[in-house]
Image (cartoon, grey):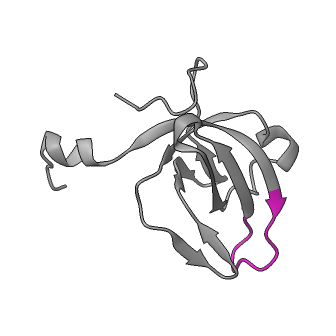
C-alpha cells in the first residue's frame, strides 16, 4: 500500500448528497442504475452505479450518500457519469456509503 500525503487527500472532493431520481440502465454492460443526486451548492449530478443486486430503485430515493465530485466526466455507453458514488464491494454486491445522520447536501467529508 502506498502512503499519500494529507495534501493528496485534500484534493479529493467527497461530499454529501441526496438521491433524487433512479432509472434502469439497460444499455450498461453490467446491471446498473442511472442515479441523480442533489449535492446542494454543487448542483445536481448523475452517475451510473452497479448497485442493482442489493437495492431497488424505490429504496434508493431519499438516501443520503457520499460522492466524489471532482473526477472528470466519464462516458458509459450513451450516458455521461458526473461523479463517483462511493461504496464497498461484497460477495453480494456493492454496499453504498451512506451517512449515519443527515447533514446539508454539499457538506464536505472531513
Horizontal arrangement in the rendering, residue 22 relative to residue 4 (left or right): right
Horizontal arrangement in the rendering, residue 92 relative to residue 16 (left or right): right
Which of the pair 9/108 is nearer the observer? 108
Question: Image point 66% across, 82% down: which residue?
Answer: 77
Residue at the far right: name it. 58
- Residue 99 among those drawn in magenta: no
Residue 73's spot in the image, x, y percent?
A: 50, 68
Residue 37's spot in the image, x, y percent?
A: 66, 45
Which quadrant is home to the N terminus? bottom left
Quarter-of-image position of residue 31: bottom right
Horizontal arrangement in the rendering, residue 6 relative to residue 76 (left or right): left
Indicate whether 48 appears above or below 76.
above
- Residue 30 among those drawn in magenta: yes
Number of numbered callouts drawn: 0
Residue 78's spot in the image, x, y percent?
A: 70, 81
Horizontal arrangement in the rendering, residue 91 relative to residue 54 (left or right): left
Indicate whether 79 appears above or below 97.
below
What secondary structure prevails in the magenta region? loop
The stretch in magenta equals 23-32
Indicate whether 65 appears above or below 34.
above
Residue 2's spot in the image, x, y percent?
A: 15, 56
Question: Image point 70% across, 51% down: which residue?
Answer: 36
Amino acid at each position: 500500500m502506498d502512503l499519500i500525503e494529507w495534501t493528496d487527500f485534500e484534493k479529493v472532493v467527497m461530499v454529501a448528497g441526496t438521491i433524487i431520481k433512479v432509472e434502469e440502465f439497460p444499455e450498461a454492460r453490467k446491471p446498473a442504475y442511472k442515479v441523480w443526486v442533489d449535492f446542494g451548492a454543487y448542483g445536481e449530478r448523475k452517475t451510473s452505479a452497479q448497485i442493482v443486486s442489493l437495492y431497488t430503485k424505490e429504496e434508493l430515493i431519499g438516501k443520503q450518500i457520499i460522492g466524489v465530485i471532482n473526477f472528470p466526466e466519464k462516458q458509459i455507453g450513451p450516458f455521461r457519469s458526473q461523479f463517483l458514488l462511493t461504496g464497498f464491494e461484497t460477495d453480494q454486491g456493492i454496499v453504498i456509503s451512506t451517512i449515519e445522520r443527515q447533514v446539508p447536501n454539499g457538506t464536505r467529508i472531513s
